[in-house]
């Protein structure tokens, strides 16, 4: 029975709970049992809130018993990236500097999940402060990719993607600063969406790079992602960057997928040296599939995209060096050296030395240097100019096409430890995803098969203009349906064996 439940999609689970065929408690217990059975190997979760999840599930069953109308995801379990504050539940952001911190309030996204009666199973592992492309930078150890536990599950949201791929949860939440929802989705054969910047509230989401960070839905199907997107999106007066506009009709688009008559752009800068042969093969097959489905393919030239990686790794570290200044060992979290023999400055220094990991320190130093007197215009200022050029390239592209497609990542999942000593090689994992963050557009990654050379998942990225998120779901649903009909779904047909 447990196996039957955990293989269901979120939409199927919600339907069975609403009809009384399943109880929310039974569904939650099935997923908690799965976590207990496999998470020692996968390490997707940092904290499992067993009692809290069962209490939420019981409340859903009581609502149904009273005849109250249930929401479209009521009773469906979810894995929450450990970057969103959750009242009474530890929030570490994958860092020792917040080990044991219990937030006194919920993030807006957390509140919206609870209001929709989504059952939060616990908090997932991540690269410390969301800085990384592999979930190897977590202070609590790496997460394994369920397709091959010796491989990375992507980053920074590898815990969320691994929870989906290992059937520990049917839904998850991630955050995307330079690709940290889409890149994990690509290498685990799942669906991940970076909504338009400002479409999902950042209030209560621990900040890394404020002009780039964006929370979003993760799932195993396009429809499930759309249902979750609709729950978490919407204006929030607590977030000054939140867009005050209606949420695009993403669920309707996911239920009525079609690319007939659409113009689909292929950017020449998103292929070439460094791209794995099997990734390009599956991408080219996806483009042919789009043609078969009635789309017109348009070749695009976006020259500034070649500069995106360099610009990102000046802007993001600069913003992180500012945001992480609040972790001083004096207000909350870890405090080291407070024995009466050290000054406040020394306590701050000792706390940061003990609490921050190597990648966080590297980015703080990069950012502080880029913002320092005499270098601001040469580095940070220049990077912001490049950001404007990238935005203009997107604007020109979207005058010619409705959406853009590309590989999500240049390669499939690499081995844990393979790039640990080479930060530049690690940063290249986000080559295709970073331009979208710099421009603030919406983007999705969905599975497009397995690479023939290693039998690991490949992701197809779809990019849409800002506040046209429904286009992602319209195209994604059409591609997903065609893939399932032709080749089967990598996670719905044959699951990774753990």
Image: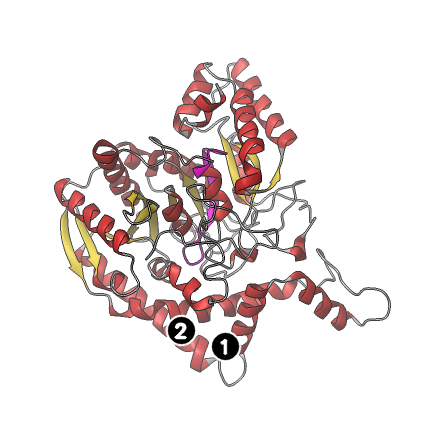
Is residue 153 or residue 366 the one in the foreground? 153
Indicate whether 254 appears above or below 134. Answer: above
Residues rendered magenta in the picture: 165-180
Q: Is residue 192 left or right of residue 335?
A: left
For mark 2, give the secondary structure.
Answer: helix
Q: Position of residue 136 (x, y in %)?
A: 52, 55
Q: Position of residue 266 (x, y in %)?
A: 20, 56
For mark 1, give the secondary structure.
Answer: helix
Confirm or deny contact between disc 1 and disc 2 (CB under 8 A). Answer: yes
Q: Residue at x 45, y 14 (%)?
A: 21
Q: Residue at x 56, y 57 (%)?
A: 129
Q: Is residue 231 left or right of residue 303?
A: right
Q: Is residue 163 left or right of residue 188?
A: right
Q: Quadrant of residue 383?
A: bottom left
Residue 437 among magenta residues: no
Indicate whether 172 appears above or below 433. Answer: above
Is residue 176 or residue 110 the one in the foreground? 176
Q: Of callouts 1 and 2, which one flags the residue occurring earlier in the amino acid sequence?
A: 1
Disc number at residue 253?
none
Is residue 297 or residue 39 the one in the foreground? 39
Crowd tier of the residue under label 1, counting other residues whose Cα lies within 10 Å: few below 14, some 14–19, many 20 or above: many
Q: Quadrant of residue 269?
A: bottom left
From the image, tell me which residue sits under label 1.
Answer: 370
Is residue 51 or residue 74 the one in the foreground? 51
Whether residue 246 is visible here, answered yes or no, is: no
Disc number at residue 383?
2
């Amino acid at each position: 029975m447990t196996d039957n439940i955990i293989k269901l999609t979120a939409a199927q689970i919600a339907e069975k709970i609403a009809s009384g065929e399943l109880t929310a408690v039974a569904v939650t217990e099935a997923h908690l049992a799965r976590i207990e059975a496999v998470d020692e190997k996968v390490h997707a979760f940092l904290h499992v809130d067993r009692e809290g999840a069962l209490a939420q599930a019981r409340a859903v069953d009581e609502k149904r018993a009273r005849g109250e109308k249930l929401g479209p995801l009521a009773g469906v379990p979810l894995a929450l990236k450990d970057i969103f504050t959750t009242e009474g539940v530890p929030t570490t952001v994958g860092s020792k500097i917040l080990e044991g911190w219990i937030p006194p309030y919920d993030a807006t996204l957390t509140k919206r999940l609870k209001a929709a009666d989504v059952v939060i199973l616990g908090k997932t592992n991540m690269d410390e402060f969301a800085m990384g492309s592999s979930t190897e930078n977590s202070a609590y150890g790496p997460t394994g990719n369920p397709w091959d536990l010796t491989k990375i599950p992507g980053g920074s949201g590898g815990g969320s993607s691994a929870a989906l791929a290992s059937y520990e949860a049917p839904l998850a939440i991630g955050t995307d600063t330079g690709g940290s929802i889409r890149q994990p989705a690509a290498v685990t054969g799942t669906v991940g969406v970076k909504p338009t910047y400002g479409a999902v509230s950042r209030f209560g989401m621990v900040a890394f790079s404020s002009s780039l960070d964006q929370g979003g839905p993760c799932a195993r199907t396009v429809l499930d992602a759309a249902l979750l997107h609709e729950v978490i999106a919407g204006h929030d007066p607590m977030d000054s960057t939140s867009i005050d506009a209606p949420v695009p009709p993403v669920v309707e688009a996911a239920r009525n997928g079609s690319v007939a008559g659409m113009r689909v752009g292929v950017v020449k800068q998103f292929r070439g040296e460094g791209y794995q042969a099997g990734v390009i093969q599956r991408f080219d097959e996806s483009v042919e599939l789009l043609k078969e489905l009635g789309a017109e393919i348009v070749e695009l030239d976006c020259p500034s995209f070649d500069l995106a990686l360099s610009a990102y790794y000046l802007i993001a570290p600069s913003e992180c060096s500012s945001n992480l200044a609040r972790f001083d060992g004096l207000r909350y979290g870890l405090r080291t050296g407070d024995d009466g023999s050290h000054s406040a400055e020394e306590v701050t220094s000792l706390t940061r030395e003990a609490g921050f990991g190597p990648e966080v320190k590297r980015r703080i130093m990069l950012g502080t240097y880029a913002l320092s007197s005499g270098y601001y215009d040469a580095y940070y200022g220049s990077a912001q100019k490049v950001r404007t050029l990238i935005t203009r390239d997107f604007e020109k592209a979207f005058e010619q096409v409705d959406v853009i497609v590309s590989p999500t990542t240049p390669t499939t999942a690499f081995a844990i430890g393979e790039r640990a000593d080479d930060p530049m090689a690690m940063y290249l994992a986000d080559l295709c995803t970073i331009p979208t963050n710099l421009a603030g557009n919406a983007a999705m990654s969905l599975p497009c098969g397995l690479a023939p050379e290693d039998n690991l998942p490949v992701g197809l990225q779809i990019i849409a203009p800002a506040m046209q998120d429904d286009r992602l779901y319209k195209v994604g649903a059409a591609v997903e349906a065609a893939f399932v009909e032709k080749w089967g779904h990598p996670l719905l047909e044959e699951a990774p064996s753990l």
